[in-house]
Image: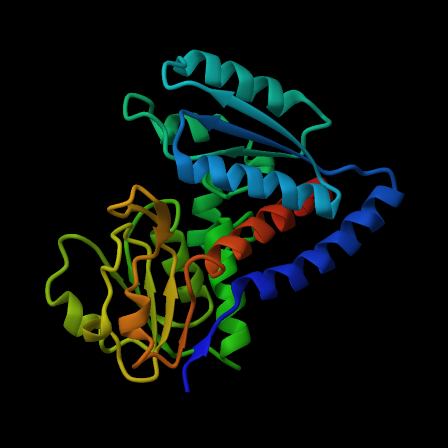
């Protein structure tokens, strides 16, 4: 029988562990504080910002949220980041995507002090990950690895296929799985024989951003399927909902384990944002 992975339940348990550690460091005079920068009115980002703030409050991490409209100038963002870099009360900085196309995410994220780069997206921290050195690792990939290690006693040697090569999820996740001794295939929009390759995967992970892109034709019998997608849909009545990259109802008949959307990877990503904030506050 397929195992439906309750990411919220796993994240809630992990968050309690983080809270205990936060309470401990606060008793020693360290008060973890996270700054979040959001640009524009993207609904996904707005929803997640609220959830992150709520979780931080529950755990005992202070947050400060900076919200700019789409017309914000790059110079203004860089000025704010510089101020946050030198503010000793701020331990972690999160630049939330997406950004307007006229702004360079890479240029702006690299303005963040790598020792405050909570999502591990600066070139320095990504280089540390790819070279196998200690550093801050992106939150979503960490959440995926956490879940995989709960589902599987040992993932070493397993074939993991990742669909999507973004610098925020697909690429760092592939490297993290390589570092965990998986055999990794990274697929993208130019990949050939995509379905056939996916069907060889022991672990299939989709981070492509296309609703119901993955159906049962992609999935080997008994494979673990991880859905990182969050796609907005509107039905004929105008009701808004969010669905994943995986056609859950179709794939559930062949998967051995599967994450739903919502309550799959999303809560784990938020929990690891708190984990990384705490790590930075403790002078990692």
Q: Is residue 138 above or below residue 112?
A: below
Q: Position of residue 71 (x, y in %)?
A: 36, 14
Q: Quadrant of residue 220?
A: bottom left
Task: State which quadrant residue 74 falls in.
Answer: top left
State the image coordinates of residue 245 (x, y, percent, origin top left). Answer: 30, 58
Q: Percent position (x, y) of residue 182? A: 39, 72
Residue farthest toward the bottom in the current orientation of the protein: 1
Q: Residue furthest right?
A: 27
Answer with left or right where residue 52 lies relative to residue 73: right
Residue at x 53% of width, y 73% of height: 149
x and y percentages locating residue 136 in the rendered image: 55, 47
Tell me the colour scheme of the image.
rainbow
Residue 78 appears in the rendering: yes
Judge from the rendering whether residue 249 lies leftward or rightward of residue 258; answer left or right: left
Residue at 37% x, 34% y: name it: 98
Quadrant where the N terminus is found in the figure = bottom left
Residue at the extreme left of the image, as rendered: 192
Out of 79 and 3, give the one closest to the viewer.
3
Q: Residue furthest front?
A: 237
Judged left or right of residue 164, residue 91 is: right
Rendered position, 63 above or below 207: above
Q: Is residue 65 left or right of residue 233?
A: right
Q: Is residue 230 visible?
A: no
The quarter of the image holding the C terminus is top right
State whether residue 205 is above or below residue 208: below
Determine the residue positioned at 63% across, 47% down. Answer: 274
């Amino acid at each position: 029988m397929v195992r439906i992975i309750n990411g919220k339940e796993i994240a809630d348990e992990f968050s309690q562990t983080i809270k205990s550690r936060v309470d401990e460091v606060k008793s020693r005079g360290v008060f973890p504080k996270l700054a979040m920068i959001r640009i524009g009115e993207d609904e996904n980002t707005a929803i997640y910002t609220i959830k992150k703030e709520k979780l931080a409050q529950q755990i005992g991490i202070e947050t400060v949220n900076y919200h700019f409209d789409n017309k914000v100038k790059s110079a203004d963002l860089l000025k704010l980041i510089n101020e946050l870099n030198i503010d000793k009360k701020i331990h972690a900085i999160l630049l939330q995507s997406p950004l307007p196309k006229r702004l360079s995410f890479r240029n702006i994220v690299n303005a963040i002090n790598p020792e405050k780069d909570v999502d591990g997206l600066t070139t320095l921290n990504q280089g540390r990950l790819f070279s196998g050195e200690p550093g801050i690792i992106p939150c979503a990939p960490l959440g995926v690895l956490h879940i995989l290690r709960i589902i599987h006693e040992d993932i070493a040697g397993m074939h993991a296929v990742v669909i999507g090569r973004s610098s925020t999820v697909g690429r760092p996740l592939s490297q993290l799985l390589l570092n965990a001794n998986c055999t990794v295939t990274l697929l993208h929009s130019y990949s050939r024989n995509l379905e056939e390759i996916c069907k060889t995967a022991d672990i299939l992970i989709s981070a492509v951003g296309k609703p119901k892109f993955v159906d049962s034709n992609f999935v080997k019998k008994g494979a673990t399927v991880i859905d990182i997608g969050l796609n907005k849909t509107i039905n004929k009545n105008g009701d808004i909902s969010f669905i994943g990259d995986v056609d859950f109802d179709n794939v559930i008949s062949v998967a051995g384990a599967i994450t739903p959307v919502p309550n799959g990877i999303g809560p784990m990503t938020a929990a690891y944002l708190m984990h990384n904030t705490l790590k930075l506050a403790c002078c990692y």
